[in-house]
Amino acid sequence: MQKRGKKEVFKIYLFRHGQSYFNKAHIFTGWKDSKLTPLGIQQAKKIGKKLKKKHINAAFCSTLSRSINTLRQVTKLHPECHIIIEDKRLLERSYGDLEGTSHHIFIHRKGTDDYKTLLHWHKISHLHGKELKEFEEKMGEAELRIIRRSYDVRAPHGESVKDVEKRVKPFIKDLISFIKKNRVNVAISASGNSMRPIRRYFEHASINQMMSWEMPFDDYFEYEIRA
């Protein structure tokens, strides 16, 4: 912590878990527990090295092993960190029926389904061969983009990013209270979509900005709380 005038400054170090096997295979993971790949472990160690000289008193992670084990690579370099809290509010966005499904299969399936619907309405009956195949793939990719990048579109029987933000907002409020009460610096091991609303809050970003972000596997974001 650093003193500035009459107030102290406490730090938040926010980072994403390392690459999981589902990440590597381009599979919708969500709440499924996919372990870190060897690269994911190296990415977690890289975050740990970057934070080695920081002072971390407490840490938060989700209940999934990829979040827990990423945090472990960080906290093992911080013997001063005596508090580790698992919080379900930091879980990745639920992809519902899509969890365990590869992006490629989804693109193919949604592209074909949408093609049949449009064909029924006689809108693309003129397409054939390569042109038809390209159209099917583009339709599927468009659906995938909507589900992955839209703020308020839910995955089938899953969550939207808006839903994730609703559960993360109370976490942020509790986090700030925890920091001020205990006067500590904290590390947070989160997932890509649970990081979005946290970053949005501290960076005062718009929804469009939040949805455009790519979350790195091997870096962190730093924020301040004054108390």
Image (tube, rainbow, N blue to C red):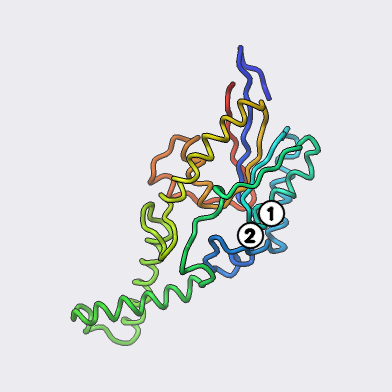
Please give the name of the residue rendered at 70% of the width and 48% of the height, measured from the top-left corner.
71
Q: Is residue 79 above or below residue 105?
A: above
Q: Earlier in the sequence, mark 2 or mark 1?
A: 2
Marks 2/1 in contact by CB < 8 Å: the verdict is yes
- Residue placed under numbered mark 2 in the picture: 19
Alpha-carbon span between mark 2 and mark 1: 7 Å
Instruction: Please name the amino acid that badge 1 sits on.
Output: Gln
* Rendering coords of residue 3 (x, y %): 66, 18
Q: Residue at x 70, y 42 (%)?
A: 84
**Outermost residue to the left:** 122
Around disc 1, counting alpha carbons within 10 Å, would you say few (fewer than 14), some (14 to 19), or many (20 or more)? many
**Quarter the C terminus occupies:** top right
Q: Is residue 126 left or right of residue 52?
A: left
Seen from the viewer's position, the closer of residues 221 and 174 is: 174
Furthest-bottom residue in this view: 129
Q: Circle 2 — which element?
A: loop
Left or right for 206, reference 90: left
Q: Which mark is residue 43?
A: 1
Q: Residues within 10 Å of mark 2 (few under 14, many from 20)?
A: many
Q: From the viewer's perspective, is residue 117 above or below residue 226? A: below
